[in-house]
Amino acid sequence: MRMEEIVEETNGKHEKMVEIALKIIGPARPSRLHVPSSLRVHDLRKLIAGKNRLPVENLKLISQGKVLHDREDEDDIFIQLNDGDSLIVAVKPKAPSGLGIDDDEEDLKFQLPQSTSRWKKKLYSFLLNRLKLPDILLMAIFSLSLKAWILVILWFILAHVAHKWDLGPLYILGTGFCTIFLNLGRRQPGDVSAYSIFNEDFRELPGTLNADAIDRDIRTGQF
């Protein structure tokens, strides 16, 4: 979006023009820019990048000691400017070509899929930006399904009831046994268990080492 388009859009909303000072970190000299008094941070970033010929994707804007972000909770952020306001403009240096440092850092960060519902995106933005939860905790939260979260909440409710009735240890043991039995899975036809007691005719897996195998190897002189 060019300066003329932004001005035309904001003029339709009766926004006045103000002059702000830009202090670019580095050898560049300070400059001034006429912008609407109220506009989106994303549009402001484009205007500054276009005027100073800077890469918009690596541009960071700082106002009153705070970094300006384009969006919050999936909504555009607007900034109110007055005559004489100053912004610090910083350009994030690009990593050397071929190293892929930025890509590696992005891969390590937890990100929601594009198909995620809007309420999940808002919750993710709140937990990340407001509560500052680490990525590993966010991954654990959003990797669980709604059914799993219902079971977790139900478990804590029942745990409180078990504690009131002095059945806490039994409740923990019961939870452990239920977890084991519910995750046993089912063998496909022809599959053999690692435990011979569960196999037909107590058939063992090839290479199983037990007392019978050791005795057999000793008797045949192989041990």
Image: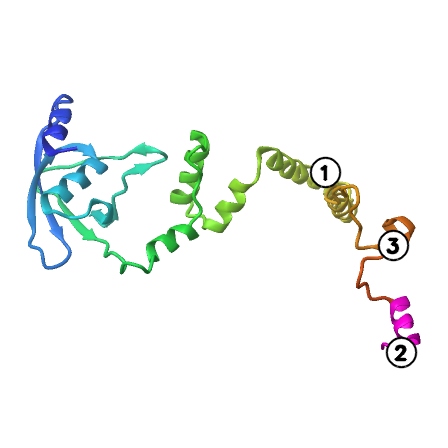
Name the N-terminal-most of marks 2 and 1. Answer: 1
Under mark 1, the amino acid is Val
Q: Quadrant of residue 182?
A: top right
Under mark 2, the amino acid is Gly
Local packing at callout 2 (Cα closer than 10 Å; few below 14, some 14-19, many 20+) is few
C-beta proximity under 8 Å, tags 2 and 3 = no
Q: Secondary structure at mark 2?
A: loop
Under mark 3, the amino acid is Arg
Image quarter (top left, top right, bottom left or bottom right) of the N terminus: top left
From the viewer's side, name the closer residue of 69 and 1. 1
Q: Quadrant of residue 71?
A: top left
Q: Which mark identifies residue 221?
A: 2
Q: Secondary structure at mark 3?
A: loop
Residue 88 visible at all? yes
Residue depicted at x 66% and y 40%: 156
Q: Position of residue 11 (x, y in %)?
A: 11, 24
Q: For the residues carrying marks 1 and 3, which lies nearer the camera in this image?
A: 3
106 relative to 195 in the view: left or right: left
Q: For the residues carrying marks 2 and 3, which lies nearer the camera in this image?
A: 2
Let me know if residue 219 is in the magenta part: yes
In magenta, the rendered stretch is: 211-223
Q: What separation in Å lies between label 2 and label 3 (alpha carbons)?
A: 24 Å
126 relative to 192 in the view: left or right: left
What residue is pinned by disc 3?
203
Q: What separation in Å lies between label 1 and label 3 (alpha carbons)?
A: 46 Å
Local packing at callout 1 (Cα closer than 10 Å; few below 14, some 14-19, many 20+) is some
Local packing at callout 3 (Cα closer than 10 Å; few below 14, some 14-19, many 20+) is some
Residue depicted at x 62% and y 37%: 148
